[in-house]
Amino acid sequence: MFDVKIILNERGLNKAIKRVPQAMKRELGDGMDRIGKGFLKRWRKARLFGPPGVMGNTRHGLFGTFKRVSIPGKTIDDMGMRIFSDSKVALAHEEGQVIRAGSGKLAVPLRSRTQMFTAKGKLKKRFKQPGRIKNLNPMKFKGQTYLVKVNKRDKSILPLYVLKKEIKLKPRLHFERMWNSLDGYRTNIINDKIKIALKEL
């Protein structure tokens, strides 16, 4: 699991808490909700629409593994908000990882074969299990082994996968990096909410 949290420590916060605790609690909850939604919207557009990020934009893909939870708390000090994912795939893209084949080799789809992917960059269902594809054979070329589709009629070949012993994933999700870059955005929202609460004095 990896996640980010909001830590409330802004100027004027203690003053607002003492004078208008219920209003402050309400405004902070609204502010944290706005921060969470705003962050996920920005991060999704920046990192999940393909290079230089990853393609996992739909709610059924990588983006769908992230959850946003508000922590109400009995007091303002106990309030909080978390955005997290339990996905091992998400963690691998966030921190980087070497994925090794248990036995044999990994069949990695060639991105140049656009017919294998949906418009959103997701591998189509019929290409997820290479072993079930008819007339698919290994072929070596320049030191690499490919799985190629052979057309029996004209004997033409179409490389679909490259076989690798391991895949090195570089850190490219940049979830935590982007969260940290929006410190000013979060601060402005919290400060605005403090001002709204103080107006109720």
Image (tube, helix red, strand yellow):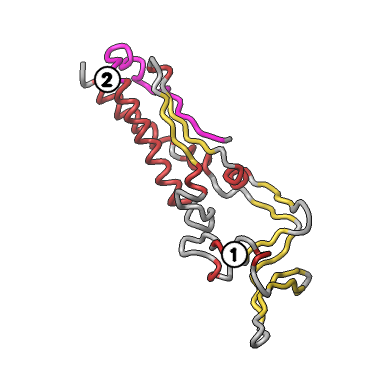
Reply above or below: 161 against 87: below
How many residues crowd around disc 2 within 10 Å: few (fewer than 14), some, or many (20 or more)?
many
170 up-or-down from 179: above or below: below
Q: Residue at x 40, y 36 (%)?
A: 36
- At which x and y percent is residue 51? 53, 58
Give yes or no for residue 148 being in the magenta stretch: no
The one of 50 and 165 positioned closer to us in this rendering? 165
Give the amino acid type for the residue marked by disc 2 in the picture: Ala
Left or right placement of residue 92 versus residue 176 in this view: right
On the image, the x and y values in percent for residue 169 come to 65, 51
Say which residue label 1 marks: 127
Residue identifier under label 2: 23
Which residue occupies the foreground of this view, 14 or 92? 92
Residue numbers of the magenta segment: 2-24
Q: Residue at x 51, y 36 (%)?
A: 84
Quadrant of image for the N terminus: top right
